[in-house]
Image: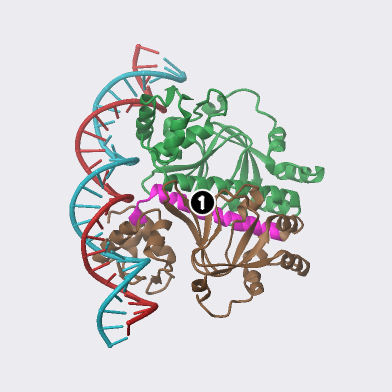
Chain colours: A green, B brown, C red, D cyan
Amino acid sequence: MSDAAREKRDPVTAPEAVMRKSPLFRDLTDDEWERLRAITSVIRAARGETIFMEGVEAHGFYLILDGRVKIFKLSPEGKEQILQIFSQGDHFAEAPVFSGKSFPAWAAALTGCTLAYFPAKSFRALVSESPGMALNMLGALSRYMHHLVAVVEELSLQEVPARLARFLLEKAPAGARRELTLAMTKGELALRLGTTSETISRVLGRMKKRGIIAEKSRKVVLLDEGALIDITHGARL
Amino acid sequence: MSDAAREKRDPVTAPEAVMRKSPLFRDLTDDEWERLRAITSVIRAARGETIFMEGVEAHGFYLILDGRVKIFKLSPEGKEQILQIFSQGDHFAEAPVFSGKSFPAWAAALTGCTLAYFPAKSFRALVSESPGMALNMLGALSRYMHHLVAVVEELSLQEVPARLARFLLEKAPAGARRELTLAMTKGELALRLGTTSETISRVLGRMKKRGIIAEKSRKVVLLDEGALIDITHGARL
DNA sequence: CGTTCTGTTGAATACCTTCAATTCGCGTGG
DNA sequence: CCACGCGAATTGAAGGTATTCAACAGAACG
């Protein structure tokens, strides 16, 4: 879409540069690298475009060269739960490539995206002959599993204020004055945290009223980190 | 515990037999098999015993030779969310071995257990020289990720009746008369589904009243499969 | 300067949890 | 063989948290 093409018009980093930086493709021999390049294709996705649907056979996986992608589940009623939001350098949909199953969730472009695409069959062949890549891949999948375990924990064990507090603490870079800029709309944040935008509004409102945070148009300053940690641990808000 | 030792006193299948059957160790060469055996140790865990705690450094992973194990998260208030229940032939805690992180959850024995244990370092060395095992491992991790995605979906997108209906449909073997025996207490089932035993009781009660299921001491018969599927899709109960 | 998307706020409601009181099931020991 | 005791399961009542629906305010963008 032209709308997408207009996003962030800085020269897109060369595919190679982004791929080289990925933990997945670190330590490749020249030979392995050549073979990887041979099976790589670069594709574009417009803002809002569906990259793949749940349930369809997995044909390959993706690495983001530019833009942001959301992975999500849909309920029969159309409610959405975002599993994860990926950005430059991240890869997604590796799991179905190796499990042989179909995609377990949806993927859609949050912004215009440039993606490197690796066909499943060729990539499996590559990995089966490259122990280094296999280990890298195992590491990547394992880390993603940690993330999913954390999502389950949040959804089932914590209430919305605790989930939000945890999110803020995780995203705010350490430093004297901890602050962060939300890289998403509050609606998206709500979907990631398994709640609604109204509830996010209300909880943020309560936090502001208590002087725990300050917030102005997606910029959040953590004023009382201790209180946030308490909320994380289940303290009433 | 002597109590555990008394469980199921049929002669424990030889470790080798169980390990051979695992998708993880299929297609190993004789050499690979020998090296695997060399790093394997067999350990016992009593019923209720903690196998590992969340947060401690992962030293290795496990394959169940006999018994059942639960993997779970704990909230600060002590509430428990079961991520998965494993039994004979299943393996667990592979992820931290490859991510280099610590255990992201707890593991405890539901029954007396016999476990094969593989030290992380030796196992990584083995995998790095065995492309077949690397691919098997990737497949196993990928399938586990599918499971976790399903758990997230259930917790965030579905209400308790839908989760329960889905569980029943999944566990009841296909056939003319679909029925199943719960391999766990209703309390455990509740923890797996992210709810309480009281709620499970009430929902099962409503299902019985509507003639959708029959139930008697852990034995459940699915009388109206269509209705169950509807509930899965969000139909009111 | 209007349109559209995003965010805020209020009121009613639904669903689940918690607490408490029983009841049931079953193995154990008298 | 029966009674006891303990964990598991059931049921009721009260309460809390989040959702939903709806109306509106604000910001971003062309």
Chain where mark 1 sits: A
Crowding at mark 1 (Cα within 10 Å: few <14, some 14-19, many 20+)? many
**Does residue B161 show up magenta in the picture?**
yes
Q: Nearer the viewer, residue B102 or A97?
A: B102
Give residue B60's position: percent from left, percent from top.
65, 57
Residue stretch rendered in magenta on the structure:
B133-162
Q: The residue under label 1 is which amino acid type?
A: Pro
Question: Which residue reaches farthest right?
Answer: A30
A184 lies left or right of B39: left
Count the numbered circles shown: 1
Element class at badge 1: loop
Q: Nearer the viewer, residue B182 or A107?
A: B182
Question: Which image quarter: residue A191?
Answer: top left
**Does residue B151 show up magenta in the picture?**
yes
Q: Nearer the viewer, residue B96 or A140?
A: B96
- Which residue is label 1 attached to? A104
